[in-house]
Amino acid sequence: MTLIGLISDVHATPEPVAEALAIFSNAGVSHVFCAGDIAGYMDKLDETIKLLVENDCQTIMGNHDLLHIDHHEDDSADNVITFLKHLPATIETIIEGKSVYVVHAQPPDECHGGIKLLDKNGQIQTDKIALWTERLQSFNHDVLIVDHTHQVFAEVIADTLVINPGSSVFNHCCAILRLPEMTVETFSLSGKQIEKTWNWGEHVIYRK
């Protein structure tokens, strides 16, 4: 059995990332995937990137990372910009005989859009399941890891286990995927209850 730690949408907030990494270490995970949006909202991007690098997190590009690069083109020698520019759009790998695909919003390589399955109360919407069942019919991977939508779910759709570990800072959670069992466990962070959905136009965007 292989355990995989999942975090996403960390938005330049290192404290919940550090807590998630401690949970992963205690559980004995072999890999950590971060599904994008390292930058955005908060202002501790240097510290956040350092944590990801020091813990060998396999990280992909998110829309906020692209935005940060665009806004700091003149800082091309900066280590933060260098790190973000070298992030891949996707990760595709085989673990325990299972094909795993990581993308920020939705396949094949989108940073925008995203897979929304839950309503604002965190309940599954059957029409969204039907929509994504159709869209993922030709998606030939066992596991799809996404975020962007700030929702928390693990649902089998069109023969693919689709996992959104949620935002470590806004949903207050991370997840561990067990392969080949294909089971997912979520963990709360920052001493807060997991918020299954965040950012429905009802939340105040964090500013500093």
Image (spheres, helix red, strand yellow):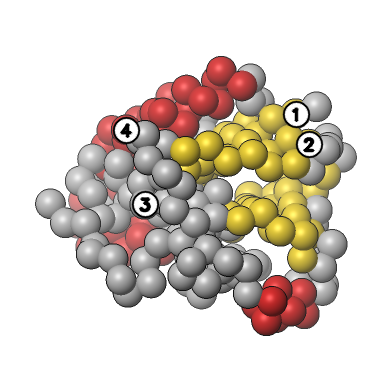
Mark 2 or mark 3: whose residue is earlier in sequence: 3
**Image-based side of 13 in relation to 148, left or right:** left
- In terms of sequence position, does the residue under pointer 2 or pointer 1 come before the other? 1
Residue furthest to the left = 208
Residue depicted at 32% across the width and 74% down the height: 201
Disc on the earlier residue, 1 or 4: 1
> Label 1: which residue?
2
Amino acid type of the residue tagged 1 in the rendering: Thr
The amino acid type of the residue labelled 4 equals Glu
The foreground one among 56 and 189 is 189
What residue do we see at 77% from left, 65% from top?
157
Q: Quadrant of residue 93?
A: top right
Residue type indicated by callout 3:
Phe
User: Dot 1 lies on which element?
Assistant: strand
- Alpha carbon distance from label 1 to label 4: 26 Å
Q: Gap in Å between the C-alphas at discs 2 and 4?
A: 27 Å
**Screen quadrant of the N terminus:** top right
Q: Is residue 25 above or below residue 64?
A: above
Does residue 49 appear in this view? no
Asked if the residues shown at circle 2 and circle 3 are in contact, with their CB atoms under 8 angstroms apart, the answer is no
Where is residue 67? Give x, y as percent: 32, 64
**How many neighbours does mark 4 have within 10 angstroms: few (below 14), some (14-19), or many (20 or more)?**
some
